[in-house]
Amino acid sequence: MLTLFISCEKDPEVPNEEELITTVTYTLTPVTTGEIVTLTFKDIDGDGGNAPIITYTGELKTGTTYNGALSLLNEAENPAENITEEIEEEDEDHQLFFAVSGGAESKMIITYDDKDANNQPVGLKTKVSTTGTGTGKLKITLRHLPNKSANGVSAGNIINAGGETDIEVSFDVVIK
Amino acid sequence: MLSINIRKFISFTFVAFLYLNVISQDCHLILSGKVIDQHHEENLEYATVYIQELNAGTVCDSIGRFTIDKVCPGKYHIIVSHLGCESKNYYLTITENTYQIFQLEHHEELMDEIEITGDGSQSRTGLNKNTLKKEILFEQAGKSLSEILTSIPGISSLKSGPNLSKPIIQGMYGNRVTILNHGIPQEGQQWGNDHAPEIDPNTADKISVYKGASAIRFGLQTIGGIVVLEPEEIQEDPHWHGSYQSTFQTNGLNFSGAATIRKSFDLAKIRLTGGFVKSGDKKTPDYFLTNTGNSDASFSIIVSNHASGKWKRLFYYSYYYNKNGILRGSHIGNVTDLEEAFNRSIPFYTEDNFSYKIDVPRQEVNHHLAKYNTKYFINESSNFNLDVGIQVNQRSEFDIRRGNRNDKPALDLNLFSQYYDLYYFKQSDHVEYTAGIQYRNANNTNIPGTGILPLIPDYINNTGAGYLISKYKLKKIQIENGFRVEFRNYFVARISNNREVIKEHLNYLNWATNFGLKTSISKDIKTLVDISYTNRPPEVNELFSNGLHQGVSGIEEGNSNLNAERSFKIVNEWEIKIGHSTNINASLFYNRISNYIYLQPQKELRLTIRGAFPVFKYIGTEASLTGGDIKLIHNITDHLQATSGLSYIYARNINQNSGLIRIPPLNLQLNLSYTFGRFWKIHEIKTVVGFSYDAGQTNVDLSEDFLNPPGEYYLINISTKFRLKTKNGNDIDIQFRAENLLNNTYRQYLNRLRYFADETGSNFSLNIKSYF
């Protein structure tokens, strides 16, 4: 009777990680003509395992205005899941912040180019304009449930935003 | 001379007269006796003995003696009371003159500890035991098990916010403390620092703690000690008796209630308990702790047969449900978020208003325990026993998630465990021993559907053990010796970083032994020494944890190469009486552990898509803990009593030449209590003023923590208790209590939420308990 209770096998189901974001791609397309610049942060196997890979294509030219588009994917699934759509559906609950620092500060200006239902920015679409030359860092942060009406937040200042960080990636930027 | 006929007539009428007297009520029986203190056998002067059926009673004389005459034969409920004691109910059948000794439990000391006489052999696990008196259980109504235990010196609480706490015994917690729930080791996800024991303290009539590892009979997870929750023997009383209690606390607008009822039927004896807690957001002196409400519900039943004949059987079932809100402002993304939280004076997401609503993040736990015990009396001095315990622990943790997934748990664990203990007990003049074999099977499953990689894998734990506990009584010395050997097999099915299922088998063979000696050095001084050597195999979370643990804001990694911990511990306890009015209880210990397993922050900061996270890895180190606690009780007058307690632990991480993380700091308590006697309709009034002080913890490696330990703080508590009597002579106890009377703002080192918020402010409570 007792042995009925004792099982000897364990076959766990590998979960379908719907919320996992493996890939962040920031694509900068010049408004007029020029080279498309992409910054990609990819960590296919999540927090452990192999280190994330950061890749760049194209060069940032000074005196140029770009349309910025941010895409989020879960490439651990095949076919890759488009997380950008989920953010768009919950746009009131999300905001992206772009912080330029080091030698590139004030040489690369990023402004919001989209709005949610409350007329607050989201950041999936941005406008980027470059002046002068320099080398620095760009940090992109995605906050979940920030306080968009706190001081400075809708202008792109993260200090009073709060919420939880779902993405925080840093890229090297060189403006030539 | 009377004729024969007249003589016969006279004899006949004489006999008839006697006969008539015999069949009419012979209400000339005498019930007499004495009322004494249960533990010190001292007479309790002016105690009252009240017979419910007669609506009458008497007061004892100055040496505790009483006499009640003109009692008719019959069955009676008798309530015995004394100032400063818990009243006790007796059910007696009186058919002739009866002499009875009634024993009451005096409140004078907090605990009964060192028992040298034969009674000590009833303690099933060892010598150094601290039992919480019923008065403490009443005063702490509405609190969790761990909070109640902190009344015992040397016991602290590891907290995760105002609702979740687990006991720390002499610096040890989690996998190193076992909780014995009605004789069955409690099986829950003990590894989690934010997982409180899933037990309603109201299911126990008696709560005790054994410090030191002499409880190896119940497992190798007892290095710190063992908490024992047990019921009392149900009296052979064919009426429903029990108590019900309700409590209201202002902080959190917390309502709680509990009831216990017992009855002896022809076939069996039954005890039922039930309880609930409903609480909303707690409050610091300055702001609400948004989303810290909790709801609890519990139920238990004991059915046992009557103690006569060869067999004794008992069945126990308990159910416990808990839903706990986690401070909304403590849920953060990465280390940047955490550091921002440090700079906030008020946590993010704090609302201005109170609410009972429990939202995400939250925990929900269901715990079932079914126990069966059967005892076969071979003869008066030996018996066979079988204990069977089946437990189901279902734990779901809900997080703040994207895409409407808030109602899908982020962690969903089902732990199904079985425990079997077959043992033989034999007692002779000077020796007593218990020999047994145990089997334990724990089956842990991650319920599919979370959409998140599990933090702890699916596994099956098969453990078989044998043990032998012997006790020897030689005049004034009692010696105990225990030995346990245990074989453990883990079958683990974990999911690797490549999302593949990898199956692992691990085996451990470990043993433990302890030696204890207790003796009276003089009539006023008792001492005991307990030496133990325990090998604790690593638990599955220490071997295979993997992933981002929101709770520690870091990535945790198990270590499958861990060896068993080897713990050597020596505990020395003293009970000293000075004159008639002073009692000192002291407990000193030294604990040296090799391969002490803990989560060590690594130098690396791992880069993930969410930012950088520190990595914590389970490693073994050399550790030592030295410390002690001392409690002094002094009766300044018959009514005025002062108690003071001090506890301190000095711990060392020897490999790192630094302190150990999460060791309780120095704690000092001072209490002054005044007990009034009878006043109008009130039978007893007791007022207590208390002061407690916690030092800052400075013996730590600051690089192992995100934030330096908070500074020292003190708290003032006061309470007043009244005892009334109903027309039936039953007690009604009422208590008003103010905790943190001055509404002090402070943070506690052992509370994980100190990164985000202050501790709760003042709390006023009203507590009423009624007996019947």
Image (cartoon, coloured by chain):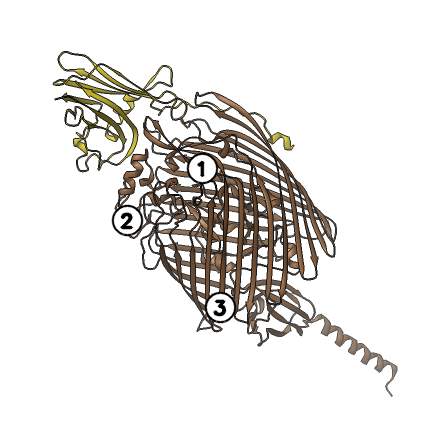
Closer-to-camera residue (B687/B603): B603
Q: Depth-wise, is mark 1 or mark 2 nearer the camera?
A: 1
Mark with earlier residue (3, 1)? 1
Q: Position of residue A56 (x, y in %)?
A: 26, 17
Up/down of B697 relative to B411, above or below: below
Q: Are marks 1 and 2 in contact (CB under 8 Å)?
A: no
Question: Horizontal placement of A29 versus B165: left or right?
Answer: left
Label 3 or label 2, whichever lies nearer to me, is 3
Give the total number of marks visible in the rendering: 3
The residue drawn where x is 57% and y is 29% is B506
Q: Nearer the viewer, residue B271 or B113?
A: B113
To which quarter of the image does residue B46 belong?
A: bottom right
Q: Which chain is yellow?
A: A
Label 3 crowd (10 A; few <14 / some 14-19 / many >=20): some
Residue drawn at the location 34% of the way across and 16% of the way down: A80
Disc 1 packing (10 Å; few <14; some 14–19; many ≥20): some
Residue ID at (43%, 35%): B396
From the image, tell me which residue sits under label 3. Answer: B634
- Labelled pair 3, 2 in contact (Cβ < 8 Å): no
Quarter of the N terminus of chain A within the rendering: top right
Q: Residues within 10 Å of mark 2 (few under 14, many from 20)?
A: some
Mark whose residue sits in front, 3 or 1? 1
Q: Earlier in the sequence, mark 1 or mark 2?
A: 2
Measured Cα–Cα span from mark 3 to mark 1 = 43 Å
Q: Is residue B683 visible?
A: no
Residue annotated with mark 1: B599
